[in-house]
Amino acid sequence: MAKDMKRRTVEAALLANGCTVLSDRGPHTKWGCPCGAHTVPVPRHTVISAGVVRNIGKRMACLPEGWLQ
């Protein structure tokens, strides 16, 4: 079950798994996975809601199970 997370925690997990920032414009930061097939927008809120955290985990399908915890 996903829970609210701080943005810096989500971004640290993305960096630790080899993801890169593709775009840093507008209200979201766009991240790409190491394989290049998946992208996900991460909102620039201090705290990211559980539903958005769950969506980020699903959209980055190539990353290992449980990477966002």
Image (spheres, grey):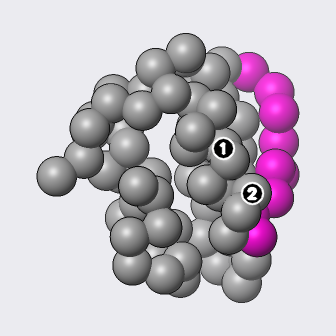
Position of residue 36 relative to residue 54, above or below, is: below
Farthest residue, direction top: 46
> Tags 2 and 1 in contact by the CB under 8 Å rule?
yes
In the rendering, which numbered label is found on residue 43?
A: none
Position of residue 14 relative to residue 50, above or below, is: below
Residue at 55% x, 17% y: name it: 45
Q: Nearer the viewer, residue 64 or 21?
A: 64
The stretch drawn in magenta includes residue 23: yes
- Residue 46 is drawn in which quadrant? top right
Farthest residue, direction left: 1
Quadrant for the C terminus in the image: bottom left
- Residue 50 is drawn in which quadrant? top left
Magenta residue span: 18-26
Q: Residues within 10 Å of mark 1 (few under 14, many from 20)?
A: some
Looking at the rendered structure, the secondary structure element under dot 1 is helix
Indicate the amino acid at tag 1.
Glu
Residue at 50% x, 27% y: name it: 6
Q: Nearer the viewer, residue 11 or 41?
A: 11
Looking at the rendered structure, the secondary structure element under dot 2 is helix
Residue at 74% x, 57% y: name it: 15
Indicate the amino acid at tag 2.
Leu
The Cα atoms of the two marked residues, 2 and 1, are separated by 6 Å
Position of residue 63 relative to residue 51, above or below, is: below
Q: Which residue is under mark 2? A: 15
Q: Position of residue 2 (x, y in %)?
A: 24, 47
Q: Position of residue 53 (x, y in %)?
A: 38, 43
Q: Residues within 10 Å of mark 2 (few under 14, many from 20)?
A: some
Residue at 56% x, 43% y: name it: 10
Q: Which residue is under mark 1? A: 11
- Residue 22 in sight in this render: yes
Task: Name the side, left or right, on which 2 lies relative to 65.
Answer: left
Q: Position of residue 29 (x, y in %)?
A: 71, 36
